[in-house]
Amino acid sequence: MQKRLLALWKIFFFLFLFFSCSTFLQAQTIYYVSTTGNDVYDGTSWVTPFRTVQKALATATLAGTQIWVAKGTYYPDEVDGTNTNDRMASFAMKNGVALYGGFSGSETQLSQRNWKTYRTTLSGDIDQNDIANFTNNAGNSYHVVIASG
């Protein structure tokens, strides 16, 4: 009887260890985005960043994933580096995926980002023609960021 209880305890312990480690590994996934990147890259470092936030969001499939976005302006209608001018385009957030801006493009820790110096903008100006005090928004996205939860 004791051997059987010990065997069950070992099974539960190893299952707990397995699931704890897999959750920890999932939380460590970071994808990088830069205006100088390319969506054919793997997005797993500042050396090989994605070009578009859309590509990073599509790639981020696990809860706990982080997306680090370097300074610059990003548009929701960008697909594979081209603009579609689709007013229905939005950045569709995923549950459990965190999106952070304010990076210069060389940081190794989240705490190193400086969002005041390295501005990251998610813009709905998909035709990229708005200026200060511009009143014609006919070429802008209906919704820039959408989330469900």
Image: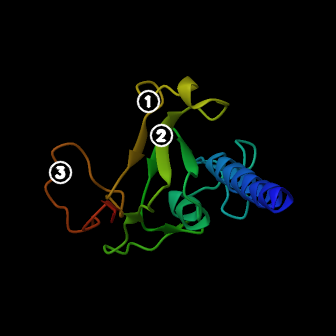
Question: Circles 3 and 1: CB distance less than 8 Å?
Answer: no
Q: Are marks 2 and 1 in contact (CB under 8 Å)?
A: yes
| Amino acid on which the number 2 mark rests in the picture | Gly
Colour scheme in the image? Answer: rainbow
Q: Position of residue 76 (x, y in %)?
A: 42, 63
Q: Quote the CA–CA distance across marks 2 and 3.
A: 26 Å
Helix, strand or loop at mark 3: loop
Alpha carbon separation for disc pair 3 and 1: 26 Å
Disc 2 crowd, CA 10 A, few/some/many (<14, 14-19, 20+): many
Taking 106 as reference, is 92 left or right?
left
Residue sitting farthest toward the front: 1
Residue occupying image coordinates x 72% and y 64%: 40
Give the quadrant of the N terminus: bottom right
Residue kind at label 3, given as amino acid type: Phe
Marks 2/1: CA–CA distance? 7 Å
Badge 3 density bin: few <14, some 14–19, many ≥20, Cα 10 Å: few
Does dot 2 land on a helix, a strand or a loop?
strand
Rendered position, 15 above or below 17: below
> Residue 134: which disc?
3
Residue 115 in picture, x, y percent from top left:
44, 29
Residue 73 vertical placement versus 52 (above, below): above
Q: Is residue 30 above or below residue 107?
A: below
Left or right of residue 118: residue 12: right
The numbered mark at residue 115 is 1
Q: Which mark is residue 101?
A: 2
- Give the camera-side residue of 62 and 121: 62
For marks 2 and 1, the one nearer the N-term is: 2
